[in-house]
Image: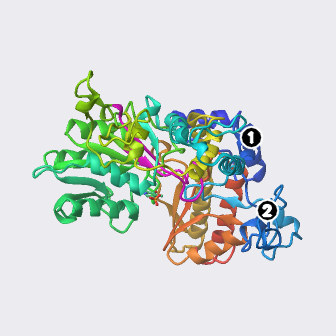
Amino acid sequence: MAFQALLSSLRAGQKPDFPGNASSLDYARSLDGEDPLAHLRDEYIVPTKAMIRKRKLGGEFGAARWGSQWRDPGPCPSDESTEDGSSAQSGADRQPAVYFCGNSLGLQPRATRHYVDAQLETWRSIAVQGHFVAMADSPLAPWQDMAAVCAAHMAPLVGAASDSEVVAMNTLTANLHLLMASFYRPTATRHKILAEWKPFPSDTYAIASQLQWHGLDAASSLVELFPDAGDRDAQDMRISTEAVLAAIDAHADDAALLLLPGIQYYSGQLFDMPRITAHAHRRGLVVGWDLAHAIGNVELRLHDWDVDFAVWCTYKYLNSGPGGIAGAFVHERHGRVTPNDAADPSKGWQFRPRLSGWYGGDIGVRFNMDKAFQPTPGAQGFQLSNPSAMDLACLRASLSVFDKTSIQALRDKSLVLTAYAEALLDGILSDSKSRRGNNGSEAPAPFRVITPSNPAERGAQLSVLLAPGTMPTVAAALEAAGVILDQRKPDVIRIAPVPMYNTFGEVCTVVNVLRDVMLGGPLGGLM
Ligand SMILES: *Cc1c(COP(=O)(O)O)cnc(C)c1O
């Protein structure tokens, strides 16, 4: 049982030993044969090489079927037609593409179409009654309950103590603003935000604009945590836990909020959330985490870690579809709603200040249209608006696949899958080194993996910093091989094998494309 042995080493924090034939497709397939989650791939639509080249719908929504008048499209004819809409394809075109971009947009679950169809049928049949009426054979709850149902299915993914610590609402950046409005309360002495040096742009803008909103600015109130190497040129991007704790100590008197990504989107570093959170709390800081790249990827225990709040999007590892409805966590101790006078509701309630809207109002009184705001206890009391039932249907569909496994099992597979990718990449580096040694050449290594090599400090993703100027050639080779993989210009490719649907065979194929282009093909002479 190679898979189990590899997993045991990885769970024990050790680098596993892969055999000499690890870069062969046979070996990769043997691991796929032992993969306990291999069946989950069938829950997703993995595009073929022809599909990813399509630039015209051509399937049921092609002009021929859609025309100017709506007609029931009936069963889905062909997702596999080519650019020109024809379905004549070579055998190679029918092969699945290799999709390693689930960290950016997850693949479509097969369930999505079914759930969306159910929602459309509900709406067209019973219209406004869909808010409250449950359809007997539908996978969906009445619209009024759907956000809470989605929250309940996300709760195990973030380690909430109860469903009420989680909410499905808005989008990630909107949630970041809403929760900062409640949790970032600067005072004359405590006003700084501690963040990392290279946040995702939206987080950078959110932080900067929050500071401005409070009449502050980044020069006086933003503390950026730089990589330990002190390297602003992105050579070694790791920020050690010790460095984070030291920065917290240094700003124990003037910082109000620590806001970090669970996993840094560019370097792929997974932060030690429990240790950092506990330390920041000891120094009196409020702690928020952006889990865009962590949810559905690594195990999280937000309640036990005592995290104050967290936000995430659902279209990356959670596969809810482009721009899908997002999520947030608010610790139970911040979500309490207590009446000023238990005997007299007209006396109002105590609750954490926030920016409110009617959907944050308790469902029992929401439609009384009262002037006094009585929030739903917990994270769901932070909702503003009537949420999109379509978005919720997509999220509910994608979460139905997570219900078939557990985040522990996904992380198990992910540890092995990513370690395998790393081992094969290391193989390229050592072959290139011995080759360069033979030539006595001083040529640079073809790439460097900038994601921490310690499996406990990363999720699924490996970020590969390519030798300067080689990106266009590498990208062309990947594209020609039908590989979809994220490029961050100028020089980083992010390889993210997703345990839900990617295989060891795919990892092997992709790294061998890189090997060919770097050691054999067009770049072979250079490196
Ligand atoms: C993907 C991502 C976002 C995207 O924000 P949206 O509001 O969903 O557009 C924001 N922050 C981080 C860290 C991300 O990885």
Circle 2 packing at 10 Å, graded few (<14), some (14-19), many (20+), is: some
Q: Residue furthest left?
A: 188
Q: Amino acid at mark 2?
A: Asp
Front residue of 148/525: it is 148
Classify residue 396 by image quadrant. Answer: top right
Residue 317 in the magenta stretch? The answer is yes
Residue 26: image x %, image y %?
78, 49
Quarter of the rendered image showing ligand 1: bottom left
**Comes first in the chain, label 1 or label 2:** 1
Q: Position of residue 493 (x, y in %)?
A: 54, 65
Frontmost residue, 144 versus 112 = 144
Apparent side of residue 83 relative to residue 233 in the rendered image (left or right): right
Q: Which residues are magenta?
A: 310-332
- Horizontal side of 106 relative to 257 (left or right) equals right
Relative vertical location of residue 374 with respect to residue 195 in this rendering, above or below: above
Image mark count: 2
**Residue pictured at 19% horizontal, 64% vertical:** 217
Q: Is residue 239 visible?
A: no
Task: State if disc 2 and disc 1 touch (CB < 8 Å).
Answer: no
- Helix, strand or loop at label 1? It is helix
Q: Which of the two marks, 1 or 2, is nearer to us in this view?
A: 2
Q: Which mark is residue 513?
A: none
Kindly report the secondary structure that dominates the magenta region of the rendered protein: loop
The amino acid type of the residue labelled 1 equals His
Give the crowd class for mark 1: few <14, some 14-19, many >=20 residues within 10 Å: few
Q: CA distance from mark 1 to mark 2?
A: 21 Å
Cβ of disc 1 within 8 Å of ligand 1? Answer: no
Name the residue carrying label 1: 39
Task: Give the residue at mark 2.
Answer: 79
Magenta segment: does it hold 182? no
